[in-house]
Amino acid sequence: MSRFFDHLGQTANVAASAREAGLPHASIYRRRTADPVFRDRWEEALDAGVARLEMLALEQALTTAEGKTGVVDLKAAHAIIAGHDARQKRMGRGGAIPCMSIDAVEALLLKRIGAIEKRLAKEA
């Protein structure tokens, strides 16, 4: 089972993680419903996967802003992050990035990057 959680923590993709671990897709959803410990591990791994995806999207936004080509599919990343955000809100846990267009997400990330750069310049 740790192979499933490791892959989920890297990809935030339940179906791909089930395939990677050789587990039937439907059975892992049944187990998540029936087993609170499994559900907690699932949520922890999924949160880690989404956080990693957010970091990769931010990294790509930075390299794109610098004129380099990134390797993350920003539309796919946005869809995964937005889906995770909606699920988190349904569970009363807040969320990551509000549902918005790719352009709006990129603008938000660049604004945050600017604020970080300003803060770092003040600290230097």
Image (spheres, grey):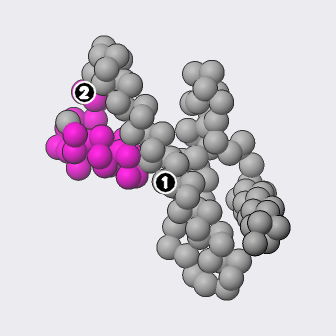
Q: For the image shown, how many numbered marks are present on the structure?
A: 2
Q: Position of residue 4 (x, y in %)?
A: 26, 42
Q: Circle 2: is it few (<14), some (14-19), or many (20+) Cα within 10 Å?
A: few
Magenta segment, which residues? 2-29
* Label 2 to label 1: alpha-carbon separation: 26 Å
Q: Nearer the viewer, residue 77 or 51?
A: 51
* Residue receiving disc 1: 52
Q: Which of marks 2 and 1 is in front?
A: 1
| Residue at image point 42% right, 34% down | 44
Q: Of the numbered discs in the image, which one, if any, rests on residue 72?
A: none
Q: Which of marks 2 and 1 is nearer the N terminus?
A: 2
Tell me which corner region of the image, top left, top right, bottom left or bottom right, holds residue 24. top left
Q: Do the residues labelled 2 and 1 touch (CB within 8 Å)?
A: no
Q: Nearer the viewer, residue 108 or 99?
A: 108
In the picture as drawn, the residue positioned furthest to the left comes out as: 22
Tell me which corner region of the image, top left, top right, bottom left or bottom right, holds residue 63. bottom right
Q: Where is residue 87 in the image (x, y as percent from the top left)?
A: 57, 30
| Residue at image point 36% right, 24% down | 39
Quarter occupied by the N terminus: top left
Say which amino acid is labelled 2: Ser
Q: Position of residue 120 (x, y in %)?
A: 75, 67
In the picture as drawn, the residue positioned furthest to the bottom comes out as: 67
* Residue receiving disc 2: 27
Q: Nearer the viewer, residue 46 or 79?
A: 46
Check the image and report above or below for 103 versus 62.
above
Q: Nearer the viewer, residue 120 or 78?
A: 120
